[in-house]
Image: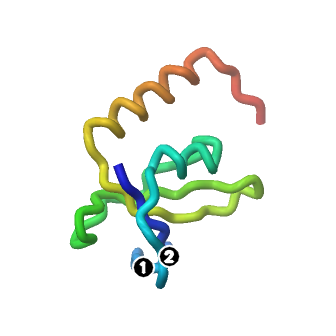
Amino acid sequence: MQSLHVNYDDATGAISRIEGATAEPWDKVCEQFDNDVRRIADATDQAGYTALYACYDEDNNPVYYLVEEDETLAKLRCKTQLSKLGRSSSI
């Protein structure tokens, strides 16, 4: 499962590629952002990438990635969601 760092304009919904960005394993990107990721939208016409995700850094700033979703990702999302069950959230 690969991901690609991109720019995303929330106002227009435009996705633009970052020059020189290379594909990265999605699980490594998730680990880098401590699994603080959110699916933003479906991605079409993006050379095999099927979804846009926002990854949030320690200052809660979004960094955007195109991801090629597959069965492995569905299992990973389920595992992460199940591991968070029963946790209390503090505001």
Rendered location of residue 15, percent (x, y): 40, 76
Q: Which residue has dot 2 on it? A: 7
Closer to the camera, 22 or 39? 22
Q: Hey, what amino acid is under mark 1?
A: Arg
Q: Which residue has dot 1 on it? A: 17
Left or right of residue 44, residue 3 in this image: right
Q: Hey, what amino acid is under mark 2?
A: Asn
Q: Contact (CB < 8 A) between labels 2 and 1?
A: yes
Q: Residues within 10 Å of mark 2 (few under 14, many from 20)?
A: some
Q: Residue at x 53, y 47 (%)?
A: 28
Quadrant placement of the C terminus? top right
Of the image marks 2 and 1, the number of the one nearer the N terminus: 2
As drawn, which residue projects farthest toward the top?
86
Badge 1 element: strand
Rendered location of residue 56, percent (x, y): 63, 55
User: Label 2 vs label 1: CA separation?
Assistant: 6 Å
Dividing the picture into quadrants, the one containing residue 44 is: bottom left
Q: Residue at x 45, y 58 (%)?
A: 24
Q: Is residue 6 above or below residue 41?
A: below
Rendered location of residue 26, percent (x, y): 45, 50
Q: Residues within 10 Å of mark 1 (few under 14, many from 20)?
A: some
Left or right of residue 20, residue 58 in this image: right
Q: Is residue 5 above or below residue 88?
A: below
